[in-house]
Image: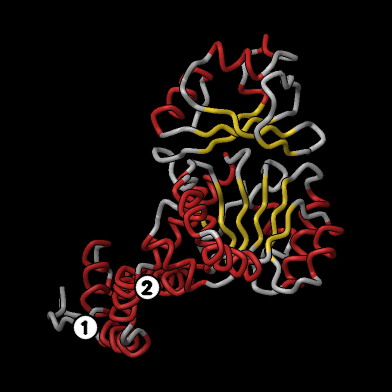
Amino acid sequence: MNILPSFKYFKELYYASFFLIIVLVGGTLGYVFIEDFTWMDAFYMTVITVSTVGFGEVEPMGPEGRLFTSFLIITTFGTFAYTISTITRYLMSGQYRIYFKTYQVMNQLEHLKDHVILCGFGRNGRQAAKTLDAHNQNFVVIESSSEIVNRVHAEQPEIVIIQGDATDETTLHKVGIDRAKALITTLPKDADNLFVVLSSRELNKTLNIITRASDDRSESKLKIAGANNVILPDNVGGSHMATLVLTPDLMEFLDHISLMGRDESTLVEVRFNNLPSDFEHKTIMELEKRYQTGARIIGFKTPENLIIVNPEPDTELVEKSKLFVLGNPDQIKRLKVALKIDD
């Protein structure tokens, strides 16, 4: 496991502590050999000298001992105060929490599998994270801004986020791209998204890649690079607003079909491998007869990725096909229990 070195985060603390230890050891040895103090008296004399507390001598000292004490005071002036202030600063600033959070994240990454990699935590990235979390989907965020990463660590510690460059293959390896099932890249520049798509497709041939694009002309390039889906947020938003003018009641109904939460989901996807093994080549009608949950199958996706709306009851269920099921929350819950589908 690649563990982020603690030296990066505690460099000043290490330097201050190391210097203080050298001073204490050197002072103790000096008093032992120059004044023949016991080890305890020598250590105590060194501490009260370095900390400048002003206590008297442990035992009367000769000229050599007083000269050594003067040298110790001059050369170590402020060492104790500097070390204490450094420790206090690290505790107050929360730097130690950042390190342990990073250590925890690296451990989590080692065990992630079939997760989603989310590149960028801007407006689109945050919305994608909200939806993934609502569906209990494991995901990890790559964000280049240290300010955003630190804020997420403080305000949303449940989110697995690392600081890094998503266009760097090393970062993609770090978040387990070879074990991931999907990647969503929401970087603001189309060129960066294109580079992420190219690198990701090269590293994982079966990865489901979804990317955003700002320019219509980038869509074809991103698909050629290996993206499964390209989303243009401006186009989607504009189309949605126009539809609210043309068919407001229909849009209100569609918005009511919630896809946002585990407990409120009314439209779900059922994969072929969620069905009992004896249902291969059986029909939708036979499935609905066995599991009378009240939910209705409103869509079917063939192995060739053809979408059929309101499929016929005699449609055969085959490997790599998918069903889209509509129902109220209770009906969907009964369906998941019947088919033993985990959220």
Between 326 and 144, which is closer to the camera in this rendering? 326
Position of residue 173 measured from the top left corner of the image (x, y, whole percent) = 70, 52
Position of residue 159 measured from the top left corner of the image (x, y, whole percent) = 46, 53
Quarter of the figure that contains the N terminus: top right
Q: Is residue 195 left or right of residue 18?
A: right
Report the residue at 54% width, 69% height from top: 122
Position of residue 211 measured from the top left corner of the image (x, y, whole percent) = 70, 60
Query: The disc labelled 1 sits on which kind of residue?
Result: Thr
- The quarter of the picture where residue 53 lies is bottom left
Badge 1 marks a residue whose secondary structure is loop
Question: Is residue 297 positioned above or below 261 on the image?
Answer: above
User: Which residue is situated farthest in the left direction here?
Assistant: 56
Between 160 and 135, which is closer to the camera in this rendering? 135
**Can residue 67 be seen in this snapshot?**
no
Residue highlighted by disc 1: 52
Question: Is residue 279 positioned above or below 249 on the image?
Answer: above
Question: Is residue 52 positioned above or below 262 on the image?
Answer: below
Position of residue 235 measured from the top left corner of the image (x, y, whole percent) = 66, 68
Residue highlighted by disc 2: 20
